[in-house]
Amino acid sequence: MKLRRLLKISRPRFWIYELGPYVLGIIAASTGGIEIWSFLPVILFFVFFSYSANIYIYGINDIYDYETDKLNPKKVSYESLVLPGERKVLSSHIVIVTLPFLVYALFTVSLGTLSALLAFFFFAGFYSAEPIRAKAKPYLDSIFSAGHYIATAAFSYLLCLDLLFLPIQTTTFMITLIAGMLWAIAMHAYSAVPDIQADRDAVLSTIATTLEKQKTIILCVILYILSGILSYPFLGAISIVLSMIYVVFMISSLKADEKGLFRLYTYFPIINTLSGMTIFFTILLRAL
C-alpha cells in the first residue's frame, strides 16, 4: 500500500480535529503558552496526533465499514474506500505507527495522563471495531466519537501539568471537559446526517437514523448552546458568539435539501477549524 494511499485514508483535512484539542490542552495548561513546546514529549505526541492517531481512527473505521462504505457515494469519491484485500497491510501499518508512542508513554507519563491516552485508544478504536462497534449503536456512537477528542485534550493538558509540576484544577477541568464533550457530540451527530440513507441501506443504526434529520439537527442546536453556556466562564463572550454561529449553520442545514445539505457538510470542517483557531488564540492571549 503506497504512502499516498495511506495518507488519503488518514483524512489530512480532518487532522485538525485531533490536533486542535491537543494544542488547546497544552495552551490551557501552560503558564506562558509557548515554553512548553521545548519539552520532547509534547513534540513527539504532536507527531502522534497528526498522522498516527488519524490513521488509527480512520483506518480502523474503513476496515470495519466496507459494507456500508461501498453503498455511500461520499466514501467512494469524497473520502476513500478501503478494499478487503487492503485490510491486512493497513492493520499492520496502524500497529507500526501507533505502538511505539504507547510504549513510550508507559515509561514516561503519570498514571492519570496515561489513562487519558488509553481512553483515546479505547474510544477511537471501539467506535468502529467489534465487539463494541459503538457507531452502530445510536447515542453511543456520538459519545464514543466525542470521547476520543476530549481524551486527546485531557491527555495533552495532563501531560503538561506533569512536565510543569502544576496541580490539576479539578472543577475547571471537569466543566471544560463537559463543555467540550457536548460540542464534540454535536459535531458527530451533525456529520452523521448526510449518511442517513446510506446507513439505512446498509442496515446501520446511528443517532441520525434513529432521530432522523430534523430531530438530530435540533439536538445539535441544543448541545451547541449548552456548550457555549458552560464555556462562558473560561472563554467569555466568544463562547456565545461561536455557539450562535453553529446554531445558524444548523438552521441552514435544517432547511436544505439533500444536495444542499451535502454542500454545507463540506464546509463543516472549515467552520470547525476557524472555531478552534478562535478558541486557541483566546486561551493563548489569556495565558500570556
Image: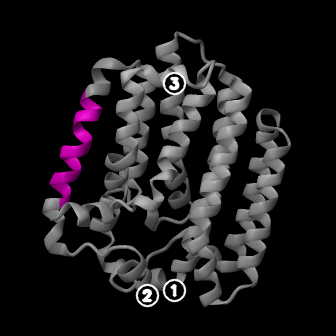
Mark with earlier residue (1, 3) = 3
Residue 152 percent across, percent down from the top left: 48, 39
Q: Secondary structure at mark 2?
A: helix
- Circle on res. 158: 3
Question: Which residue is painted at 44% across and 21% down in the image?
Answer: 38
Neighbourhood count class around disc 1 (C-alpha, 10 Å): few under 14, some 14–19, many 20 upward: some
Q: Are marks 2 and 1 in contact (CB under 8 Å)?
A: yes
Residue 145 percent across, percent down from the top left: 50, 55
Question: Which residue is painted at 36% across and 39% down in the image?
Answer: 47
- Magenta span: 90-103
Name the residue type under label 2: Asp
| Whether residue 232 is visible | yes
Residue 81 percent across, percent down from the top left: 30, 76
User: Which part of the image, by quadrant, shows the C terminus?
Assistant: top right
Q: Which residue is mark 1?
A: 197
- Circle on res. 137: none
Indicate whether 195 appears above or below 13: below
Residue 112 percent across, percent down from the top left: 46, 23
Foreground disc of the pair 1, 3: 3
Q: Is residue 118 left or right of residue 251?
A: left
| Whether residue 148 is visible | no
The front one of 155 and 122 is 155
User: Which part of the image, by quadrant, shows the N terminus?
Assistant: bottom left
Name the residue type under label 1: Gln
- Circle on res. 201: 2
The mark total stands at: 3
Q: Secondary structure at mark 3?
A: helix
Indicate whether 17 appears above or below 152: below
Foreground disc of the pair 2, 3: 3
Q: Is residue 61 left or right of residue 5?
A: right
Does residue 86 belong to the magenta stretch?
no
